[in-house]
Amino acid sequence: MMDLLEKTTKGSTTECNSVVLALLLLAGCFTQTYGQEKTMFDVRKQQAVNQADRAPAKPVVPEGNFKKTTLTRDFISEGVAVADLNKDGKMDIVAGYYWFEAPHWTRHELAPSRVFDPRKEYSNSFLNIGMDVNQDGWDDVVIIDFPGKAGFWFENPKSKSGVATPGVATTGGWKKHILADSVGIANESPAFVDIDGDGRLDILCGDPAKKQIIWLKSPSKPGETEWKRFALSQEKVPGTEPFSHGIGYGDVNKDGINDVVVREGWFQGTRDNKAGNWVFHPASLGEPCSHMQVLDVNGDGKNDVVSASAHALGVWWYEQVNDEQGNINFRTHLMSNTTAQTHSSIMADLNGDGRKDYITGKRFLAHHGRDPGDSDPAILLWFEFTPGKAPYYKEHIIDNDSGAGLNITVHDMNGDGRLDIIVANKNGVFLFENQIRK
């Protein structure tokens, strides 16, 4: 640079000024580019610091309304389900490639697998469903793998070597079926919902190849094994990347038809759930989150959205409001900053008041201990809603040494009429029997 300046000084003043100006502009570009990168790094660093600073200062104490059973402390799955796999009339617990036989929770394999290192690895099971896929009278197991990969299901071998006779557990013989021609399942919080109203669970997710909101229809006739792919939205829409966070299903605009919500907005549903023409409405629905729930939080007659941060700190409800043109948008309200990385949620009536409650929990070691607060106490909690009575919700702590994985399951496991909670994550597999007095 100095040589160039020396050469230009021998020429005209105009030439010298031009070269100097060019060099200054070039240096400015380098400085600006570096500055932008440094600024973004600093922002992310400060966000992490802020999240850590906002963590609870005192221990969170469970209320003592749930009886906890630890099935294992091994990291084998971040998905969990319940199903009666051996047809003995008792609901078993499924965690990935393993199942725990009720009532003593004896552990068995569906297929060869292993224990994973929670500080170094992800498992081969992110979300699970227990259901009779082919309607042969025996419950099967559906597994959603790493984001973007195809899902699959294990067919119960009935009287074959997998489950020989009712009440007798063996291993092997579970046939693996890939879902919907190997369609990748995008969005880290796919939803298990009945899209077409046939009474059977389907899978709501994104297609990472076409960037499209889709649903995978479960087999509807006895003997069928194929899940079929149908599009709800056009291609190249938000919420469809493999690592997109947050998706939900509910009637946003109260027209009697369920819609799809993602954190960037909502897709307006129509009667045709196979046309791929649901219109997207941009809206502000917060940070990357877990499963999004649609309900009227404050009792004003409009459906709101509740979600929890997948990797940062916070649980929020988004109040539905209308702008001057009558368009739907949302106003953010913080519900809780008790714990971070609440990477799953489910709605269920825990206290028997006829209104569904919101259940979520910390995904322990979500990124193997690399995030701020990653290894903080693994809290499991629920919120009851009080429409018409501000602040419209009340937080309850279930446990501080379990958390949740990527899906939460509820079922009355002991036949007492109360819904119990089942979770699996890097902390292990747990059953919480509900003892809340109605």
Image: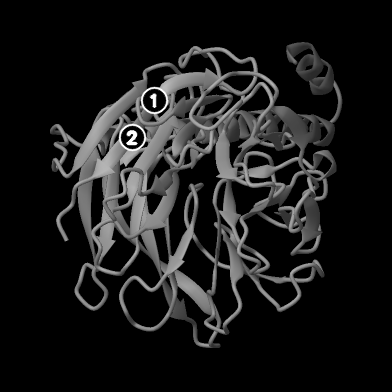
Q: Which of 71/192 is in front?
A: 71
The label number, if any, that marks residue 431 in the structure image: 2
Position of the N terminus by quadrant? top right
Q: Looking at the image, which residue sits at the far bottom?
A: 325
Q: Which residue is mark 1?
A: 105
Q: CA distance from mark 2 to mark 1?
A: 10 Å
One can see residue 17 in this view: no
Name the residue type under label 2.
Leu
**For the point 77% across and 49% down, which residue is it?**
227
Instruction: Answer with left or right where residue 8 lies relative to residue 142.
Output: right
Q: Are marks 2 and 1 in contact (CB under 8 Å)?
A: yes
**For the point 44% across and 75% down, which residue is it?**
303
**Mark 2 or 1 closer to N-term?**
1
Residue 126 location in percent, x, y? 57, 33
Instruction: Answer with left or right where residue 392 lies relative to residue 208.
Output: left
Relative vertical location of residue 63 with respect to residue 438 in this rendering, above or below = above
Which quadrant would residue 100 be assigned to in this image? top left
One can see residue 154 in this view: yes
Within 10 Å of disc 2 (Cα), the crowding (few <14, some 14-19, many 20+) is many
Total count of labels? 2
User: Which structural element holds mark 1?
Assistant: loop
Name the residue type under label 1.
Trp
Q: Which of 207/69 is in front?
A: 69
Residue 372 location in percent, x, y? 37, 27
Q: Which of 290/313 is in front?
A: 290
